[in-house]
Amino acid sequence: MAEAIAISLSAKLALALSRSAAGSLSPLFSIRSNIAATTQDLDLLRTFLRFADSRQGTDDLAAAWVRQVRDAAFELEDVADECCYLSGSGRGWVNVRAWFSLSRKLRKARERLRQLSAAKEMYGIRPVDGPVLPFAITSSRIISDNAHFVKKQEIVGFDDHEKKLLEWVAQDTEPRRTQVAICGMGGVGKTTLATSVYKEVAKSHFECAAWVAVSQGFTEGDLLRKILKELRRDLCERGSNGVSDSEADYRSLMEAVQGHLAKRRYLIVLDDIWNAHLWGKLLHLAFPDDATQSRVIITTRSNEVAKAATLERTMVLEPMQWREAWALFCNVTFRDVPDRTCPSHLEEIAANMLKRCHGLPLAIISVANLLALKEKTEFAWGNVLGSILWYKSSSDLGIGEAASILNLSIDDLPHHLKKCFLSCSIHCEDFLMKRKILIRQWIAQGFIEEKPDQRTAEDVADDYLDQLVQRGLLKAVIRNEFGRAKSCIIHDLIRELIIHRSREEEGFSQFVDSKMPTDRNIRIRHLVVDRCEEVDAPPVRQLAALRSFYAFRSGLDSSLLSRFRLLTVMDLWFIEITNLPDSVTDLHNLRYLGIRSTLVEELPKHLGKLQKLQTLDAKWSMVCMLPSSTSNLKSLRHLILFKRQFADLYIPVTGMAVEVPNDLGNLCSLQTLKYVRADKNMIRSLARLEQMRSLDLSGLDESLTADLSASISRMSHLLRLGLELEPTSDAVLDLESIRRPPLKLQKLDLRGRLARGKLPSWTCSLTNLTQLWLCQCEIAEDSLMLLAKLPRLLNLTLIDAYQGTNITFTARSFPTLQRLILRDFPNLSHIEFQEGCLIKLHDLVLSRCTNLIETPQGMENLANLQNLNLFGLPVEFVNKLKQLDGSAAYYKPDNGEFLRVHGPMRRWKWTERNDI
């Protein structure tokens, strides 16, 4: 993490140099020259910081030096942010005193940096020849080797996985070489499972075998030498060419490995692979495919690595369920007790101990081994429970080994991913983190850089998030139709680690159900208050360094918000304040302002002073109109609005769109504009917003059609579009006049009667469309046939959108559709599914089709249907469906997940429209 400090700060200093006010005034105080020189000093230090990172947990001197460098970096960051703040104030010479003070701070910080640079030479902190193995990597290799000596009865919770792995490795008769990947987070039991199967079948089913721990920091030559060494050990032979492996070149090593494996049935286990390119670049060449039923098993923490090796035979291990975890805990803790059961007087404290392990086998075994050596008393065990600190990578309490393995996944992250991941520590346990909110906050905090390949910062951040999911550090709980993570959580044990590390390395402080301390020695850079009844104002010295402020369900005095001078992110959730103070507009560095699910009714009149603001998220607030100065927010990228209908934060209710200023054309960076009311001037101004990706408008009528079509025709980057007519009008929505339809469009949401009862003819050109929602559109069957040819359509929802009595899904129609919802079709009496239609349909929902008495014809043609949901259908329909042959593909009475019959539906969950 130390190197990341220098990289991040160098980028921030470069940004400070580019500010206009700094360019005009700072020469007077030598600020520009000092910042430039400091940037060079940091670049020189980066080599030593990388070395210090590699010595983490093994070199106390290097760690102490890094802590001091971090403090100096924070001081320099203060200077850079203060420079940006003064540049954004627009007050020029009025702030001469502030510029003078800034110059003095910069000279002082530079001097401290020079002293630290000299200190590293004085104390011998310098890179050494050859690779340095951190403690965590050494521990990982020891654990890999120890897996060979685990007794069969000590392996718990892997019965099903072991059976499947044996089937893939030993029982499958596929002649070609096949790969099997075991994937999961560190400590989840991948090595134990792979080794157990290896020991069982290596000698009985294969002619030769090798088990190799790969881990980090390998070279291709070293890996081939290790494989060759293991093969020779297995075959009990020596090299015959007279050349030692240490002297052999890459080609000789490759030929030697191939020679040992040629024409033999072999089993290779490669434990703990980190590099996704390893298989394609090296290993598939080293392991011949001679149709001998050879097998290769790899274990990895990365989904990307697993996919690189095999797309079909991947086994994902998850943390243990409670019963399995308890069995493992008792097996190890009470291994010297005949029945291996926990005494009743220790059950409660044992359960609390087990909860701290969060189902991770390595953590359970570490704690159990420790307790096995303790007296079986509540006092002795209570001391252990109160002393477990998972974040310590040392031998403290004997759990340092587990902590090191968990930390290894974090240490392996490149600097840009590490900063993003550590920032996730702000969220409480089991909190669902929304993808788009995360990436917008990462951008606001400067963690993301625009790439020269024309990708936006949002695209880059999206890729970062995907990498964290692939590495198993974030778990995707909900995925969108593209397979990307939509909402994520962090494993609780990993969360404990990053809370500590983010506090130590980034200045994060989190307070849950408590009052904030007033210790003046604590310098807080990122503050989280979660369910605190009363948030007292910390000392001014603490507030001065604050960069981000997050408040969740806490009692908050709104006057506190304007005191965070250098703040870049302010995010309030479920806060019962009704206004933001006008002084908030003096936070010139603010880039993210979130008041989601608050009672804020009005935004400051001079909101436009926040010239660096990138995201304004007022969804589910009480804001009904934006101030006119909003049109001055030239850096704004995302504007999300949706007014709550009632002032009750804890009752899910519907909402309404929000009025915005007429002239939005100045917001040239705007990419997201959601849930706003339309009028003529505002619609016309949209024509200048050519960077728009997501647009959702309400209150449309026929008078806006021409201007709306002209504006949409200029949005070539548009990915999501939602249009809703004024509910009380008799207007129709005519989109035929859009000359250049948005061909990149992925989601389309239309609400209201369509002109001529038809979708626009250009709908067939939307070849990237994956999700379509039509409500009260009154389309006919010819429009359905138009949709049937779309090549990527995955989700189709039709609500009161069709007036016909019959729907026929013809052969080869909707070839990619996975989810179909038909709701409020009062005239529909007949549905037919012809053979070859909807071949990928998984979910079918029929709701409130009150005239549908006969069961759909040809439902047996829906071969891949998994879920059939029925809401408010006639009783005759449901009874006839149940009377059909129970062996039919669409009705499985024993599968409660397949057929769900619901009574009259009182409220439809409005989720698609209100996605972020």
Image (tube, rainbow, N blue to C red):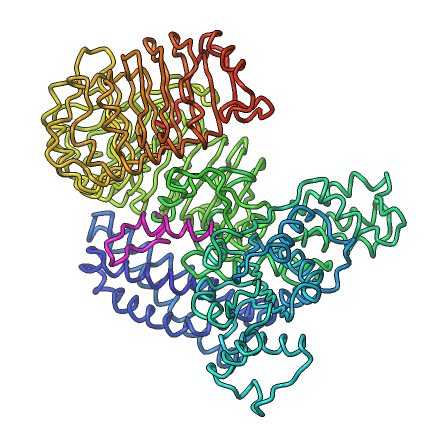
| Camera-nearest residue between 628 and 539 | 628
Position of residue 786 measured from the top left corner of the image (x, y, whole percent):
23, 28
| Camera-nearest residue between 803 and 679 | 803
Residue 460 covered by magenta stretch:
yes
Q: Residue at x 31, y 26 (%)?
A: 810
The residues colored magenta run 444-470
Residue 143 sits in quarter: bottom right
Position of residue 262 measured from the top left corner of the image (x, y, whole percent):
54, 74
Q: Is residue 141 left or right of residue 905?
A: right
Q: Residue at x 79, y 47 (%)?
A: 330
Position of residue 807 measured from the top left corner of the image (x, y, whole percent):
31, 18
Give the residue at the far bottom of this rendering: 242
Position of residue 752 measured from the top left corner of the image (x, y, whole percent):
24, 18
Q: Is residue 268 left or right of residue 862?
A: right
Asked whether residue 279 is in view, the answer is: yes
| Camera-nearest residue between 822 and 446 | 822
Residue 909 sits in quarter: top left
- Residue 892, compared with residue 367, is above or below; it is above
- Residue 347, compared with residue 831, is above or below; it is below
Residue 752 covered by magenta stretch:
no
